[in-house]
């Protein structure tokens, strides 16, 4: 019989914890052995949704780790606390699935890598866009050389705002009081649309670019008078092949998982012999080539188990003792973090900066 993967979910700062726990709950070879948050109220929904017994609910992560003894820990803290929580959990000798983004800074990302390297366990950075069929199909077409060598990536993504939805994309109506309390809107906590969404575009863009990194970065962010974080950023990255653009937005007209806003959320990828448009949640991608410059809509690939969601993917990799690869690997996500750090520095200095390396 297969050994079941014992999973614990720790820190519910990010609403994506509910989505990841649902994937664990629905997986035939997984068992939720514990959940933990210092604020019990934040675990109520998960307790109800997944019928978690009281002896598997904790408010102290140490007790959770010692009693539940998980094989894999899902972490969903605020961005500024990613390194802190990785270093807290690493000594217990478990694999970690950290919900996006990678970290608040490259220094934090490197500290996370170092903490996990010392244990011999795997660190996984989840980017939900990695599991959208349109973007997986685009990567396949790129690998099949349908558009030649990628020379430009254009990315625009976001949503109405982080308080407009909860786990499972359940719609909510944000209040001024909730916004004032939310870590998403606090600079020290790693809030802002740039830190929330740029890592997606930068990391998947690196995936499309086959691991190539830019030379320099220029970034501009909006400066709302009543907020300490941005809700809109535009980042230009100069590669040896030319320019790419990454734009993040809280405040889209509609949420892309309900109705695509204009501009559409997703990617346009330009190659030496063609182009691809790959929009979030859409059933087709559009391919334009020299042989067919008018273009054609291609149906997206149907993602199959275990390559259809992050929890199934990680469980499969661990069971087969395979390394995590692509955007979820620390190596590729680190390049995305370099772009994020460079953008933060550029926006602060109001000038173009070389790609940050340390």
Image (tube, rainbow, N blue to C red):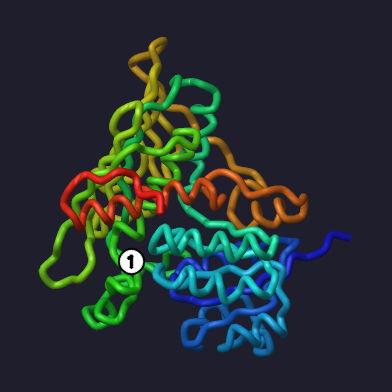
Q: Is residue 188 above or below residue 58?
A: above
In this picture, residue 241 sits left or right of residue 90? left
Which of the pair 73/330 is nearer the observer?
A: 330
Identify the residue position indicated by label 1 in the image.
162
| In the image, farthest residue toward the top | 291
| In the image, farthest residue toward the front | 358
Residue 169, located in which quarter of the rendered image? bottom left
Q: In this view, does 14 lie above or below 301?
A: below
Q: Residue at x 64, y 81 (%)?
A: 52
Question: SS at mark 1?
Answer: loop
| In the image, farthest residue toward the left | 225
Residue 92, can we see it?
Answer: yes
Can you give x and y, in whole percent of width and height, for residue 267 in the image? Answer: 36, 39
Q: In which quarter of the image is the N terminus?
A: bottom right
Can you give x and y, in whole percent of width and height, for residue 91 in the image? Answer: 65, 74
Residue 31, can we see it?
Answer: no
In this picture, residue 57 sits left or right of residue 332? right
Residue 263, located in which quarter of the rendered image? top left
Label 1 crowding class (10 Å Cα cut-off): few <14, some 14-19, many 20+?
many
Can you give x and y, in whole percent of width and height, for residue 121 in the image? Answer: 68, 61
Q: Is residue 32 above or below residue 348?
A: below
Q: Residue at x 33, y 66 (%)?
A: 162
Can you give x and y, in whole percent of width and height, for residue 325 in the image? Answer: 60, 45
Q: Which residue is drawn at 65% across and 64% down?
A: 118
In this picture, residue 315 sits left or right of residue 347? right
Which of the pair 109/180 is nearer the observer?
A: 109
Q: How many labels does the image show?
A: 1
Q: Quadrant of the C terminus?
A: bottom left
Q: In this view, does 290 lie above or below 304?
A: above
Q: Which residue is drawn at 51% across and 77% down?
A: 11
């Amino acid at each position: 019989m297969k050994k079941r993967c014992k999973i614990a979910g720790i820190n519910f700062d990010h609403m994506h914890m509910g989505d990841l726990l649902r994937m664990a709950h629905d997986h035939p070879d997984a068992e939720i052995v514990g959940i933990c948050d210092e604020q019990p109220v934040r675990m109520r929904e998960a307790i109800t949704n997944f019928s978690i017994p009281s002896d598997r609910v904790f408010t102290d992560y140490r007790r959770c780790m010692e009693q539940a003894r998980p094989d894999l820990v899902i972490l969903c803290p605020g961005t500024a606390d990613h390194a802190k929580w990785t270093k807290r959990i690493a000594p217990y000798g478990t694999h970690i699935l950290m919900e996006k983004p990678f970290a608040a800074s490259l220094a934090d990302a490197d500290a996370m890598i170092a903490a996990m390297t010392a244990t011999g366990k795997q660190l996984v950075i989840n980017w939900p866009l990695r599991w959208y069929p349109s973007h997986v199909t685009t990567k396949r077409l790129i690998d099949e050389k349908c558009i030649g060598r990628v020379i430009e990536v254009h990315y625009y993504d976001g949503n109405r705002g982080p308080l407009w939805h909860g786990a499972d994309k359940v719609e909510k109506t944000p209040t001024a009081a909730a916004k004032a309390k939310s870590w998403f809107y606090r600079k020290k906590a790693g809030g802002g649309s740039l830190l929330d969404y740029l890592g997606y575009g930068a990391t998947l863009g690196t995936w499309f670019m086959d691991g190539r990194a830019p030379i320099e970065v220029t970034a501009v962010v909006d400066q709302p008078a009543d907020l300490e974080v941005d809700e809109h950023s535009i980042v230009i990255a100069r590669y040896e092949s030319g320019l790419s653009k990454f734009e993040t937005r809280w405040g889209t007209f509609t949420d892309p998982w309900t109705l695509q806003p204009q501009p559409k959320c997703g990617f346009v990828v330009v190659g030496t012999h063609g182009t691809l448009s790959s929009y979030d949640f859409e059933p087709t991608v559009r391919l334009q080539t020299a042989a067919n410059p008018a273009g054609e809509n291609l149906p997206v690939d149907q993602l199959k188990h275990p390559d259809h969601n992050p929890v199934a993917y990680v469980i499969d990799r661990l069971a087969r003792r395979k390394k995590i690869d692509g955007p979820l690997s620390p190596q590729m996500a680190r390049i995305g973090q370099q772009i994020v750090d460079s953008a933060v520095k550029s926006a602060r200095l109001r000038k173009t900066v070389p790609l940050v390396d340390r």
